[in-house]
């Protein structure tokens, strides 16, 4: 397991609230029945994690759509680079 997976897991579970911890530690293998129940519980119905993931998806789509924050920021960066003489495609 890569070292950053532990950090990513913590971010997804604790900070972003879009995941659940099924097991902990590089040497632990979860019980398949327990694992199946946990995954099924999160993916079906109206779990807090599923609601949060849908909300985050809407925010991301809005940000990268034309007129969104990320779209505007990238456009501003392109304009600055053009002013500095950086050619498109290089």
Image: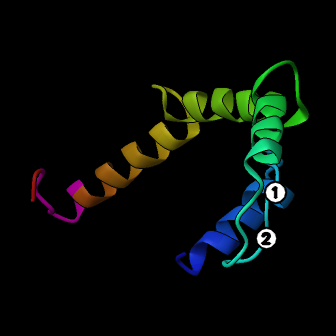
Q: Quadrant of the N terminus?
A: bottom right
Identify the disc placed on residue 32: none
The vertical placement of 9 against 71, above or below, is: below
Q: CA distance from mark 2 to mark 1?
A: 7 Å
- On the picture, is 43 further left or further right than 62? right
Q: Position of residue 44 (x, y in %)?
A: 79, 21
- Write down the residue under mark 1: 21
In terms of secondary structure, what is the magenta stretch mainly?
loop
Q: Are marks 2 and 1 in contact (CB under 8 Å)?
A: yes
Identify which residue, 36 or 11, lies in the foreground: 36
Q: Position of residue 28 (x, y in %)?
A: 73, 72
Count neighbours of disc 1 (C-alpha within 10 A) and say few if under 14, some if 14 to 19, many if 20 or more.
few
Q: Position of residue 60 (x, y in %)?
A: 60, 35
**What segment carries the magenta color?**
82-88
Identify the disc placed on residue 24: 2
Identify which residue, 65 or 73, lies in the foreground: 65
Which image quarter: residue 15? bottom right
The vertical placement of 76 against 63, above or below, is: below
Which image quarter: residue 51? top right
Identify which residue, 51 or 87, lies in the foreground: 51
- On the picture, is 32 further left or further right than 47? left
Residue at 85% over, 18% down? 45
Residue at 51% over, 27% down? 67
- The number of numbered badges drawn on the structure is 2
């Amino acid at each position: 397991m890569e070292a950053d997976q532990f950090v990513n897991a913590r971010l997804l579970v604790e900070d972003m609230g879009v995941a659940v911890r099924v097991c902990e530690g590089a040497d632990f293998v979860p019980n398949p029945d327990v694992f199946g129940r946990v995954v099924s519980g999160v993916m079906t119905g109206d779990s807090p994690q599923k609601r949060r993931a849908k909300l985050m998806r809407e925010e991301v789509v809005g940000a990268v759509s034309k007129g969104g924050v990320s779209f505007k920021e990238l456009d501003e960066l392109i304009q600055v680079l053009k002013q500095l003489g950086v050619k498109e495609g290089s």
